[in-house]
């Protein structure tokens, strides 16, 4: 996929402790075929005086996913939870009053509660199209 300067994207983090998280950014420069300079919309530079700017690989970028309205989530739904300035991939493991949901994060083994407003349907960008997780990994139960 070709990304243009000025495009809003999400960057998938591959760093320890941040694996499975996505951060919103804007492309500010192209630095060759596979590298781009981005400016994060939610992360601050070390000096706290402006947005963090970083050089990233094009393979770590994806467009910002479209919003999918979800009136509720079910146990085992794959979701993105907004926390610590980014979106973290997890699975709903419970529902509480409020509405709040308990989400389990496989990458860390942690489980936290979130209001519905902090969750979105997880989507994967496959061959130029957004595929909601409910269409990708349906659960099939067998009696074996």
Image (tube, helix red, strand yellow):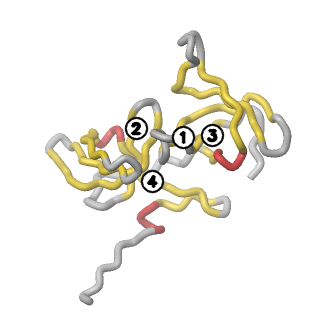
Q: Residue tagged by mark 4?
A: 122
Q: Residue tagged by mark 2?
A: 82
Q: Secondary structure at mark 1?
A: loop
Q: Residue at x 58, y 18 (%)?
A: 45
Q: Position of residue 74 (x, y in %)?
A: 27, 59
Q: Residues within 10 Å of mark 1 (few under 14, many from 20)?
A: few
Q: Residue furthest left?
A: 97
Q: Residue 6: which disc? A: none
Task: Estimate the spatial distance between the alpha carbons at disc 3 and disc 2, rounded to whole Å.
Answer: 16 Å
Of the image marks 1 and 2, the number of the one nearer the N terminus = 1
Task: Estimate the spatial distance between the alpha carbons at disc 1 and disc 3, rounded to whole Å.
Answer: 18 Å
Please identify the quadrant where the C terminus is shown: bottom left
Task: Estimate the spatial distance between the alpha carbons at disc 1 and disc 2, rounded to whole Å.
Answer: 18 Å
Compared with residue 43, is residue 115 higher up or lower down, i.e. above or below? below
Q: Residue tagged by mark 3?
A: 9
Q: Residues within 10 Å of mark 3 (few under 14, many from 20)?
A: many
Q: Residue at x 45, y 39 (%)?
A: 17
Q: Secondary structure at mark 4?
A: loop
Q: Secondary structure at mark 3?
A: strand
Q: Residue furthest bottom?
A: 144
Closest to the camera, between mark 1 and mark 4, is 1
Q: Residue 15: which disc? A: 1
Q: Secondary structure at mark 2?
A: strand
Task: Estimate the spatial distance between the alpha carbons at disc 4 and disc 3, rounded to whole Å.
Answer: 16 Å
């Amino acid at each position: 996929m070709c990304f243009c300067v000025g495009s809003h994207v999400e960057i998938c983090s591959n760093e320890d402790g941040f694996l499975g998280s996505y951060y919103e950014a804007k492309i500010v420069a192209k630095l060759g075929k596979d590298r781009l300079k981005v400016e994060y919309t939610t992360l601050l530079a070390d000096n706290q005086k402006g947005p963090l700017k970083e050089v990233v690989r094009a393979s770590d970028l994806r467009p910002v996913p479209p919003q999918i309205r979800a009136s509720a989530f079910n146990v085992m739904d794959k979701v993105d939870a907004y926390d610590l300035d980014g979106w973290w991939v997890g699975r709903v493991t419970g529902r509480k009053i409020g509405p709040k949901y308990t989400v389990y994060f496989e990458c860390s083994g942690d489980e936290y509660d979130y209001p519905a407003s902090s969750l979105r349907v997880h989507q994967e960008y496959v061959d130029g199209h957004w595929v909601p997780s409910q269409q990708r990994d349906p659960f099939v139960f067998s009696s074996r």
